[in-house]
Image: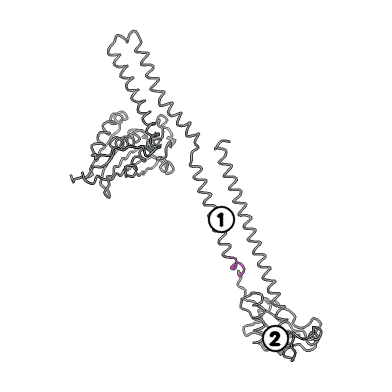
Amino acid sequence: MSMKKVYPLIIFLITFSVLGILYIQMSWIKNALYVKQEEYLNQLDKTLDDVRQIAHNSFINAEGFNPAQLDDEIKESIIFTKFTAQTIPAEEMNMIIVQAMKNQGIKQPFEFCITNIFNNPISASQGFTGSMFAESINIRLTPAASAQPETFFLYVKEPKNYIMRQMASMIIASILFTIIIISAFALTIRTMLRQKNISEIKSDFINNMTHELKTPLATISLAVDALNNEKVIHDTDKIRYYSGMIKEENKRMHKQVETILQAAKLEKQEDLNLNIQSLDAHAAIDKVAKNLSLQIQEKLGELHLNLIAEKSMIDVDEMHFSNIVFNLLDNAIKYSKDAPIIHITTMVNNGMLAIKIKDNGIGMNRETASRVFEKFYRAHTGNLHNVKGFGLGLSYVKTMVEAQDGYIKLESVLGKGSTFTVNMPLSKINNHEV
Ligand code: ADP
């Protein structure tokens, strides 16, 4: 299966399972909430039972018996004939309730009230009000068949989200983990999509290379044919012209091959073999600018050199430094819709020499700008079809700038132009103020 088909499948599978996990987790939490709620109601029921039980025992005790030693039947008959909560003082009742709640692990504040057959309170906590009846749970304190029924009302102060709060840490943790999973997933997908698949890169590269080498080869072949022409063979001027052409095309091919070889070499960083020497950056930039001036003229462009840094000696490998400037300037010329206007400015910035190469070309959007230093990356340059390259130039530039302790920055606005700034450390010894 090709990578192109694998990506959507992976994205689909992961999205599907993340949604599934979310769903399961949510229903699980909902379930847990429900179970907790049930458990709480159950605890309250048991509390009522306990209150009744303890109240009965306390009454029997007050009658002068030990409830633990008393026969169940006798106990029941005493309760049936004599029990009334009126004999239990409110403070004792309060203690009984605290005890019963403690048995069930409930710590909420409460109020209580006990009513007689006429629904009149016979005992109550101080804070109990009439409106609490509706929200209280209750139990008959007296036996079912009693002629003087007494009812116990318990009002538990229940903050609305009591159960929710008990489970808050769990819910928060699960939300947090879900967010982490989703962001990690998003990040993975982003990275995945950014990675142009290898076979695509390979075929792009081969297409580019074929094109780059085919043109000079065709030209050379034509020139050789011309040289073999009877009329030409005796014309020294023509021979010179055609052999010059062959030489030019050969040079061009050489440059292409050099680019590819350079890129291959960069793979093995340790083999860079830098020949670091003190170099006057201004002189080197000047030289590169001269080499490219013909190309700029051809496009009716302008190059403005503004080499005004007060120090310009840097410790670099001359060949690589020139290549860096060449690549940037070459791109500035290549990626312009019409006449390129290019400014090269130098300045000293935090002990570094900043070399700014500013063009008014096609510019880049943010996505492109963040990727141009990647090997083989090439933006789709819209109507600039004729601009060919391997997408290796800027990755070479960045690698070499960094190998020489510098750094490169890019600012670009789509349709307006780009500014590359190379910062190289100034030479420590050879710099004197000018
Ligand atoms: P190449 O020029 O061979 O394609 P580079 O690595 O030099 O490779 O550049 C990579 C890509 O960056 C180019 O294909 C182009 O899309 C973009 N780019 C580079 N320089 C500029 C520039 N000055 N203006 C606009 N786009 C640029």
**Residue 32, located in which quarter of the rendered image?**
bottom right
Residue at point 38% right, 16% down? 222
- Residue bearing the label numbered 2: 121
Above or below, comparing residue 371 to residue 255 in the picture = below
Under mark 2, the amino acid is Pro
Look at the image and give the residue range highlighted in magenta.
162-167
Q: Among all residues in the image, which is located at the extreme bottom?
A: 64
Residue 331 position within the rendered picture, expressed as x and y whole percent measured from the top left: 35, 35
Mark 1 vs mark 2: in front: 1
Q: Nearer the viewer, residue 99 or 121?
A: 99
Where's the N terminus, which quadrant?
top right
Q: Is residue 280 magenta?
A: no
Calculate the distance from the C-alpha at mark 1 to the C-alpha at mark 2.
Answer: 53 Å
Under mark 1, the amino acid is Thr
- Asked if residue 417 can be seen in this view, the reply is no
Tell whether 41 sits left or right of 235.
right
Secondary structure under the numbered disc 1 in the rendered image: helix
- Residue bearing the label numbered 1: 178
Tell whether 430 sits left or right of 152.
left
Q: Are marks 1 and 2 in contact (CB under 8 Å)?
A: no
Instruction: Specify which label sits upstream in the sequence, 1 or 2.
Output: 2
Q: Nearer the viewer, residue 357 or 399?
A: 399
Q: Quadrant of ligand 1?
A: top left
Above or below, comparing residue 242 to residue 65 in the picture = above
Colour theme:
one colour
Is the residue marked by circle 2 packed among few (<14), some (14-19), or many (20+) residues within 10 Å? some
Secondary structure under the numbered disc 2 in the rendered image: strand
Residue 284 position within the rendered picture, expressed as x and y whole percent measured from the top left: 25, 36
- Magenta span: helix, strand or loop, mainly? helix
Residue 117 position within the rendered picture, expressed as x and y whole percent measured from the top left: 76, 85
